[in-house]
Amino acid sequence: MGHTDTLDPPDWDAFQRQAEAMLGLLCTHLRGLRDQPVWQPPPEAVRARHRSAPPRAGDALAEVCAEFATDILPYGSGNTHPGFMGWVQGGGTPVGMLAEMLAAGLNANVGGRDHMAIEIEREVIGWSRELLGLPEGADGLFVTGTSMANFIAVLVARSGALGAGSRRAGLRADGRQLTAYASAGVHGCVARALDMAGIGADHLRLVPVDDAFCISLPDLRAQIAADRAAGALPFLIIGTAGTVDTGAIDDLDALADIAAAEGMSLHVDGAFGALAALAPGLRPRLRGLERADSVAFDWHKWGQVPYDAGCILVREGHRLRTAFAGEAAYLSRAETGLAAGAWWPCDLGPDLSRGFRALKVWMTLKVHGTEALGRAVQRSCDLAQDLAARVAAEPELELLAPAALNIVCFGYRAESGHDVNAAIVEALHVGGRVAPSLTRIGGRPAIRAALVNHRTDARDIEALVAETIAHGRRLTGLDRGLRRRPAA
Ligand SMILES: *Cc1c(COP(=O)(O)O)cnc(C)c1O
């Protein structure tokens, strides 16, 4: 084959026709989501087909695509579906899907060098900064998700507390134990970030929450004072804007005051909640976010951008470089030419090679605008209020936590010792109409509906309530009891 033996298509016209067919497949799929089950388990025969040896000779793209259509597409986790309310996941958009294709076509490596993808990432980081109210001078980076963004924030705060020299000398040079603080409702990835940073997960103090599931400020102050008295070095407060269990938003303004008084950093985990800033009616709830030293959040949750699109913003952008920049001859910079640019994204975080995540956020914001995204955020919260009201009105159901934002935790009432909520959630998943998830509130299993998906509407809320009650009655035997009851 000689010079023609590349991986490009031998017949570009045929390739383009196939590409259009694949686009058609996805458009048909997305248009018909509501008619599909939210989730169905991959059949054993399908799973078995995919325990195969590496393909040595290739197949036609059309055939491989047909396999995608039968074996992969119907067996997603359901997060694009309007009935999906499990965990906290975004629904994605058709526009985001196309942006992913464009980004893949460019195949940009956004770790560095002088090209337009870097300018676009800077543009979107600038938009993010402005939308969340951080000042000019803030900088940031797209990363996989808030787990990674929280980890970066811990590393930035660590080198802030110990000085950049600690990057070489390590943690023991200081002699004092670094300690961090967050509410008991903090996401598990924050403890893991302290673990990965070498500080140790035990040195994340989990401060009790108040009745609204927000961090208790008197307990926080007392814990910091106790640690100082014991010779530790309290360095970081992590506030949560939208806890994963209940959607509680810590008093960020008060946390900023405490951090300032104590000479500590304030980081905000705003994985989904930070984008409440897009909804004018919710924005005041985030008061104090603009004072944070860093914010981690996801465009792939409430921002509806396809996975993955996490984001870290740091108030004093240079602190990212203090924490991460290095010198390597093979990455040296030039005044002009392809290797120009004083700072490259690889100086701001742990990754060198990076994809063009910013493009799908850029295109989502350009096409839909922040107002439409904000309306989707507001709608999630309105639906949560509707659901909470439905739960309150049903004698068989009970609300298990205040529905502060877009998350409703509730349960089916059963005699103590016979909790059916886990079984209800399983039955709902298998039923395929709606998919909430399970959590524990105050030690009790709770059905948790996290309303994030822009496609979810009142029909899905109604189906959740009706099916929860039906399964609850079946599981407690109440349906038999009702049938046995003599007619009046
Ligand atoms: C989802 C979530 C995370 C983790 O974010 P990923 O993007 O999944 O890594 C962290 N904190 C909170 C509050 C979350 O909801």
Image (tube, rainbow, N blue to C red):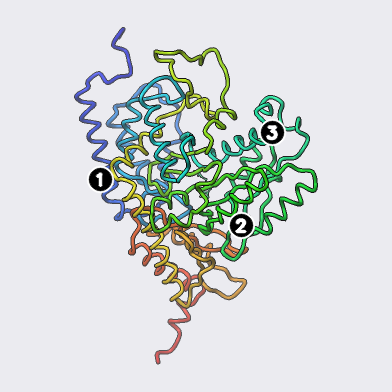
Q: How crowded is mark 3: few (under 14 residues within 10 Å), some or many (20 or more)?
A: some
Res. 78 in view = no
Q: Distance between the residues labelled 2 and 3?
A: 26 Å
What residue is drawn where x is 43% and y is 39%?
309
Determine the residue located farthest toward the right in the rendered image.
230
Identify the residue under disc 3: 162
Q: How far apart are marks 3 and 1 (CA)?
A: 55 Å
Res. 82 in view = yes
| Mark 3 in CB contact with mark 1 (< 8 angstroms) | no
Whether disc 2's CB lies below 8 Å from ligand 1 is answered: no
> Which percent across, then down, holds residue 100?
34, 34
> Which percent across, then down, holds residue 124?
39, 36
Identify the residue under disc 2: 215
**216 relative to 27, above or below:** below
Residue type beneath disc 2 = Ile
> Which percent across, then down, holds residue 383?
38, 63
Residue type beneath disc 3 = Leu
Determine the residue located farthest toward the bottom in the rendered image.
488
Say which of 65 and 98 sits in front: 98
**400 relative to 42, above or below:** below
Residue 446, quarter of the rendered image = bottom right
Residue type beneath disc 1 = Thr
Say which of 488 and 279 sits in front: 279
Identify the residue under disc 1: 28
Q: Distance between the residues labelled 1 and 2?
A: 46 Å
Q: Residues within 10 Å of mark 2 (few under 14, many from 20)?
A: many
Select label 2 or label 3 by which is in front.
Answer: 3
> Circle 1 sits in a helix, a strand or a loop, which is it?
helix
> Circle 3 sits in a helix, a strand or a loop, which is it?
helix
